[in-house]
Image: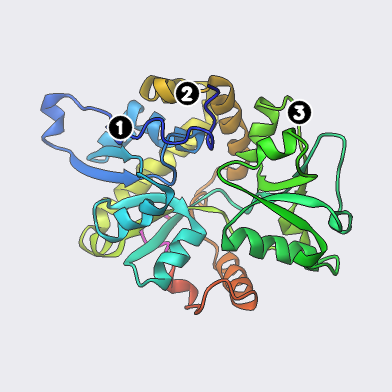
Amino acid sequence: MNLTRRSFGYALAAMAAFAVAPSPSSAQNLTKLTFIQEWPVPDGFWVPWILGSKKGFYAEEGIELEIVTPPTVADTMKFLGTGRAQVAFTTVMDVIFAKEQQAPVTAIARYGRGNNWGILSPQGTPLAVADLKGKTIGIYNDAWTKAQLTMMLADAGLTLDDVSTVAATDDTVPLLLQKKVDAITGITNAEGTGMATTGGQRAEFLPATAHGVPNTPIFMIAGNDDWLKANPDLAKAFLRATQKSIEYAVAHPDEGVAAFFDLYSKAYDEKFITQQWKDTVPLFGEIGPDLMVSNEADWVALLDALKKFKVVSEVLEPSAYYTNQYLAQ
């Protein structure tokens, strides 16, 4: 079984939580922090905090970090909103949808500098947006995927009626490799990684941001509002350790992948995770003080698009969804 990010299924449901165990003497001085993840099984996006925990970056800030995998993708915000987790690695849209349900959650840092979602096609078969007319596209059956695809098509005067779509249950890559579709939706460091490791090819990529889709980062780190208000210094300490972890993992990719293997050896496709982290590193851009700082303009553009395409029933002010107040700037 070739375990990749999406084809893991729930093979490791029993592996619900991991904490890098400190020594008995130091454990008494650490505050346990539960960090719920975005996916039910481990993926390469987690390399920074896995490596940072192993290097002692969180312990240096007085934190014992517990990395928790949710039972399903829908449970990340439930854990965070109810306080079962204090912080979460999640997506920007999960934060927005949670706020729509009045959940007490706020994005406190970005993970990456932009939106790397788009259309992938087989190597040697690049597509322009206009070329999508009459094509069959493999998609995920969620509102944001359809909204982004709608925005891209509109850039060439097309609509969803001009294409056929096939919804994948958990992974669009097999649809493309089996030639059941002409192209798929996805991101460079998940579906793009899968095309490289499973398909042995570098997929052609049509970036959504070049065709009317906001460049807001896909992934965010979020916190429970009540916990943030009660523990501002701990939130700042967590983000300091996380930024240090990202910076170190970017500079030491092989060490990061090795740390991932040490913790999740039973859920590990070395080829996929190695490539996934390699594909993720460029998304951080130039490492600097603003690495995790959210951009107001990105949020404004995203919320305007959500309102225009009626993805959510009500759009709040950007400050209702995110804050930079726990980041050192």
Q: What residue type is labelled 2?
A: Tyr
- The residue under the point 87% across, 35% down is 124
Kindly report the secondary structure that dominates the magenta region of the rendered protein: loop
Protein image colouring: rainbow
Relative image position of residue 316 (x, y in whole percent): 47, 78
Q: Which mark is residue 149?
A: none
Q: Gap between marks 1 and 3, in whole Å?
A: 34 Å
Tag 3: amino acid: Gln
Q: Where's residue 216, x and y in %? A: 59, 60
Q: In this view, does 25 lie to the left or right of 228?
A: left
Residue occupying image coordinates x 35% and y 72%? 102
Q: Mark 1 points at which residue?
A: 14
Q: Is residue 145 above or below residue 55?
A: below
Q: Where, quadrant-wise, is the C terminus in this rendering? A: bottom left
Badge 3: how crowded within 10 Å, few (<14), some, or many (20+)? some
Q: Is residue 304 above or below residue 113?
A: below
First in sequence: mark 1 or mark 3?
Answer: 1
Q: In this view, does 201 lie above or below 99?
A: above
Position in image of residue 235 (x %, y %): 30, 53
The residue that disc 2 covers is 268
- Judge left or right: residue 173 versus residue 223: right
The nearer-to-camera label among 2 and 1 is: 1
Whole-angstrom CA distance, mark 3 to mark 2, is 21 Å
Residue interval drawn in magenta: 323-328
Dot 1 surroundings within 10 Å: few (below 14), some, or many (20 or more)?
few
Q: Residue at x 85, y 69 (%)?
A: 157
**Disc number at residue 201?**
3
Looking at the image, residue 310 sits to the left or right of residue 184; the answer is left
Residue 66, image quadrant: top left
Tell me whether circle 3 and circle 2 mark residues in contact (CB < 8 Å): no
Magenta stretch containing residue 38, yes or no?
no
